Amino acid sequence: MTDTRMRPRQQGVGGRISATTRTVRATTQLVRSGLSTTTRTTRLVVHRAGWSALVLLAGMLLLALAWGWVEAAAITCFVAVAALIALAVVFVPVTFRVRVDFEQSRVVVGRVSVAYLTVTASRRGSRATVVNVPVGELTASFLVPPLGPRETWREPFIIPTERRQVLTLGPAAATRVDPLGLLSRDTILSNKTELYVHPRTLAPDYSAIGLLRDLEGEISPTISPSDIAFHSLRDYAPGDDRRHVHWPTSARLGRLVVREFEQTRRSEHLVVLDLRRDSYDGEEAAELALSAACSYGVEAISLGRSASVRFGETEMPLTTAMRLLDAASDTKFVAEGPALDELVHAGLRERPQASAVTIITGERIDSEEIARAVRTVPLSARPLVLRTAAGGRVVRGRIADAPAFTFAQLSDLRRISGVMVL
């Protein structure tokens, strides 16, 4: 297997730095990246040595013609021959096709993702060539060996997924460089494609039911003497509504029996995420907050509940979990932004019927600012404040009479939901 190298994109062909490569057995079906291999464009690059050679050629030619220096004429001939050889080398046509495949077009941050470079020679075969595939801010460089007619060469390479992002893969380019490094020519063999590195999510098991009865709302554990979700029968007690007497059972038992119901409450969850970078104690805490917000959104989508997830001033798409996570992959934290109360107010203006409002921010934000945001929530809705930290255990408290939790692990969301009082 040919050694694969990762190097910064701005460096030249020789400026490679080593990177960890591993051969990964492909156990899943490959997803075609959709890269076009028919459209080819070329880009000629004159390196610093090439410009120096041109200046030297012009200077020596001037000296040879003006003063008749034999040495200058000799140098002129030597540089001209070197330039002609460089042109002949870099303009050798590329006689193969390139395809870039990857196992999955969407992966969760931290999961191993493998892409494959496949080179297929033409009926005339091909010479040894360097093929570069940009992967985000890095470039994977492959030394493709000489190939016979119609021969195929395939090489895997690791795609970095250590952080949430939309990673651009490609375009693949064949690079030819002359031996003296005067010129190089890149032949673009494919288009760009994108790999979505999604944030981690889980199901928080948060009910998000509000305080108002709603015939189309979510069923709660609270027992009610009148509603639409039947629960059980019990003996009649003075003051019970006789409209709820179950007459067939009462006739059979010889005593009055009434129906009990499970109370239904309105369920519309508003999640507000603070995107200000200074609110969090480091990148890890900020990414945890974003993962928590996405977790509530994905859970609402899977359960068919009405919800709104706002990242700063932007309302995220909740048509499918995939669209939400794709948009979250491209979300950037900002240096400055609106205060929390402004974000909550804007969300409630769009979702005035919200039954639960979850405010997600960092540990470094001032408690008074959080209190102002909580006071923006109407009495008909249930507020919840989540603050992420770089480490530590779950800490429970209250801010402006709203439950507030500080946590450092995504799995802590389930514990938080378990201690919430309906």
Image (spheres, grey):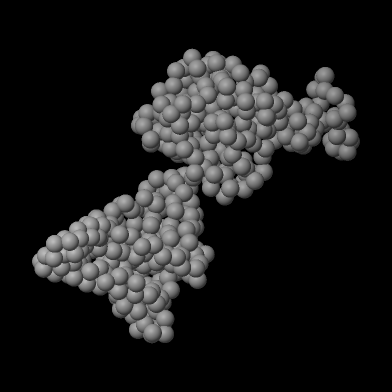
Above or below — where is 218 with respect to 6? above
Residue 174 lies, in percent from the top left, at: 36, 67
Rendered-image quadrant of the C terminus: top right
Query: Total marks drawn?
Result: 0
Residue 389 lies, in percent from the top left, at: 39, 29
**63 vs 173, nearest the viewer:** 63
Quarter where residue 126 is shown: bottom left
Q: Which residue is at 48% across, 55% downward?
A: 194
Horizontal relation, residue 290 to residue 160: left or right: right
**95 vs 275, nearest the viewer:** 95
Q: Which residue is at 50% across, 71% downward?
A: 38
Quarter where residue 146 is shown: bottom left
Residue 370 lies, in percent from the top left, at: 51, 19
Above or below — where is 151 with respect to 175? below
Q: Can residue 257 be seen? A: yes
Q: Which residue is at 62% across, 48% downward?
A: 320
Above or below — where is 63 with respect to 367? below
Q: Which residue is at 42% across, 70% downward?
A: 98
Rendered-image quadrant of the N terminus: bottom left
Q: Can residue 20 be seen? A: no
